Amino acid sequence: MADDLFGAAADERLRRAAPLADRLRPASLDDVVGQEHLIGPGRPLRALVEADRLSSVILWGPPGTGKTTLARLIAARSSKAFVALSAVTASVKDVREVTASAERRLGEHGQGTILFLDEVHRFNKSQQDALLPSVETGLLVLVGATTENPYFEVNAPLLSRSTLFRLEPLDDAAVRQLLKRGLEAEDATADDASLDLLVLRSAGDGRHALTALEVAVALAAERARDTGADRPHVAEVDAEAALDTKAHRYGRDEHYDVVSAFIKSIRGSDPDAALYWLAVMLAAGEDARFIARRLVILASEDVGLADSQALVVADAAARALEFVGLPEAKLNLAEATVYLAAAPKSNRVTVALGRAEADVREQPRGEVPAHLRDAHYRGARELGHGRGYRYPHDDPRGWVPQQHRPDHLADRVYYEPSAHGAEEEIAERMRQRQDPGT
């Protein structure tokens, strides 16, 4: 009895000392903030959990969206035993021990086992293979959590035996609700401006928002003690200090103006100006994914084939952002920004596509020329499909002159390469192919 009392007291002290995000961890699905598409009334994950019929699942989403919380709630509602491992530290030996324990538990007590595997993408192939037979037979119900795309990071056999649930970043209303719960738990109040800043800089990460709030409340508590106030009041200066940032915010209209200035600076080949507007957007808490998407679009729209590596660099920056996150990914965005600004520019692909789309809209489509039609199915040859087609690889030049469009569009010109960057070389190749004498 004494041990139970001491254990309960220790648990209570640990609970009080735990980070705010852990203290506010929901006790039921109804307490979860966000993810309505999964756990709202009648939604799929909620229905499976409440019926205790959940099979193996992969919870995929950004940090701070509730993956661990959902795993613990699943365990609380289930009649199965709950075992947690971190893929960062667990080994194949650990997996085998969990499997052996699950077999004993099932044989002796008829109780199944849920294995919560955090950071499941960190398991290598051999570790995932060791887990697969137990998941396949149902001995273990796997609840895997990952911030990485499981289609790339989780073995196909394991993924095919699991249901994938995608968690979304928390929206502003959900983050604000979390912050209000945090203020209540800390017996504190806050300015609207400070909450706005915490919401903005959290980028949909509930844990990050609560961690910053906890620091801000601690700062406000120091001031409250000095002034004799009844309880801490979080001002904007406290939120700024907790986030280690100034509140550089802008409204919706200015958002579009700053984005426009950013894009036009890159298009205008001014790296310094582009970096300045990038810094403004980041300081204001602009969604970094939005910035990355704009860079990927601009790489094709304004650089195009004048430098075909531009799209590769922009895409790499977008992927790096997903992989490492902010603040480190600021460097990846800056690198792509400078590369695109310094690159030769061409919008000829954009113009060419517009011309082709105009013809599709305004001209009769016409038939596919017979020599270009599919000739692989039975009877196609008898219909004349493929007859007269000249295979470019049979020609020593690697190409042959032949018509590839309907007759009424055969002479239309869509793509006209510029003289900038690599397009100058493309233009020369096209000129040689148009000149029978070369």
Image (cartoon, grey):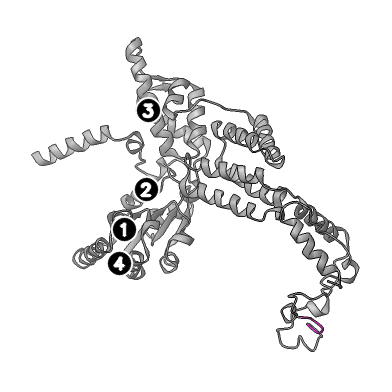
Q: Is residue 51 visible?
A: no
Location of the N terminus (image quadrant): top left
Where residue 287 sits: x, y (%)? 56, 39
- From the image, give the main secondary structure of the stretch colored magenta: loop
Q: Which residue is mark 4?
A: 139
Q: Mark 1 highlights which residue?
A: 115
Crowding at dot 2, Cα within 10 Å, few <14 / some 14-19 / many 20+, comes out as: many
Q: Is residue 394 above or below residue 225?
A: below
Assess whether mark 4 and mark 2 are in contact (beta carbons under 8 angstroms): no
Can you name the residue that lies furthest to the top here? 227
- Report whether 335 appears left or right of 299: left
Regarding residue 68, the answer to whether it shows in the image is yes
Q: Which residue is denoted by mark 3 in the rendering?
A: 215
Above-or-below relation of 271 to 96: above
Q: CA distance from mark 1 to mark 2?
A: 12 Å
Q: Earlier in the sequence, mark 4 or mark 1?
A: 1
Position in image of residue 168 (x %, y %): 50, 47
Residues rendered magenta in the picture: 386-390
- Marked residue nearer the N-terminal end (3 or 4): 4
Label 3 and label 4: CA atoms lie apart by 43 Å
Q: Are marks 3 and 4 in contact (CB under 8 Å)?
A: no
Frontmost residue, 437 versus 277: 437
Q: Name the residue rendered at 73%, 75% in the picture.
A: 398
* Residue behind mark 2: 68
Q: Is residue 79 magenta?
A: no
